[in-house]
Image (cartoon, rainbow, N blue to C red):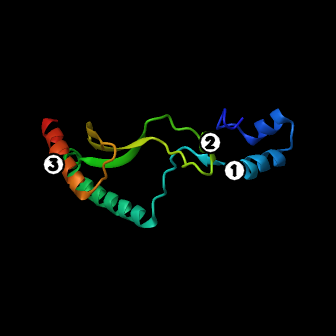
């Protein structure tokens, strides 16, 4: 049953085979050595230091806004990076799959999206080519060769 449907639950197995939950669990885990793994990406939490830096940056922006009002807002370009999933995220529990201990754990397909916007909307959405790593050089290239022309054209 596990080989036919890697998302089958122990409850479904024990009901179908008319055996106890504990016995079904024992056979799956100990005898055939399958275990449940989450097949979806789970975001990490912000650290206290990063939260503090975000708060400080927001306070500086608020002070500038109070001094310059609408003129200030028109000059701000914000940017952020996020993982863009190539599938529709589901709950962690539903995404769990049976995986043999000898096989690598599945991973959700995702790509790094860098998004820039101002007070009138999105300026640039840039997807990092698969296999590339975000370094200071690649980020500087993104700013110079992609963002600056996008700002000028807008």
Badge 1 element: loop
Is 21 in front, or is 88? 21
**Looking at the image, do the residues carrying marks 1 and 3 touch, with CB atoms under 8 Å apart?**
no
Left or right: residue 40 versus residue 149 is: right
Badge 2 element: strand
Left or right: residue 5 versus residue 22 is: left
Residue at x 69% of width, y 50% of height: 33
The residue tagged 3 is 144
Residue 28 in percent (x, y) is at 74, 46
Question: Mark on residue 33?
Answer: 1
Question: Mark on residue 97?
Answer: 2
State the CA–CA distance, disc 1 to disc 3: 52 Å
State the CA–CA distance, disc 2 to disc 3: 43 Å
Residue at x 29% of width, y 48% of height: 79
Residue at x 26% of width, y 55% of height: 66
Is 36 in front, or is 100? 100
Q: Earlier in the sequence, mark 2 or mark 3?
A: 2
Q: Quadrant of the N terminus?
A: top right
State the CA–CA distance, disc 2 to disc 1: 13 Å
Residue 53 in percent (x, y) is at 36, 64
């Amino acid at each position: 049953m596990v080989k036919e449907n890697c998302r089958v639950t122990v409850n479904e197995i024990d009901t179908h085979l008319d055996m106890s939950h504990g016995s079904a669990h024992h056979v799956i885990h100990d005898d055939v050595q399958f275990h449940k793994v989450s097949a979806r990406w789970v975001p990490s939490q912000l650290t206290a230091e990063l939260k503090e830096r975000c708060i400080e940056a927001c306070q500086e922006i608020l002070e500038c806004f109070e001094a310059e009002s609408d003129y200030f807002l028109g000059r701000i370009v914000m940017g952020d990076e996020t993982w863009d999933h190539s599938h529709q995220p589901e709950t962690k529990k539903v995404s769990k799959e049976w995986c043999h201990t000898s096989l690598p754990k599945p991973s959700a397909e995702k790509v790094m999206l860098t998004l820039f916007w101002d007070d009138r909307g999105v300026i640039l959405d840039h997807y990092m080519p698969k296999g590339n790593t975000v370094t200071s050089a690649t980020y500087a290239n993104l700013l110079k060769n992609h963002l600056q022309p996008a700002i000028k054209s807008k």
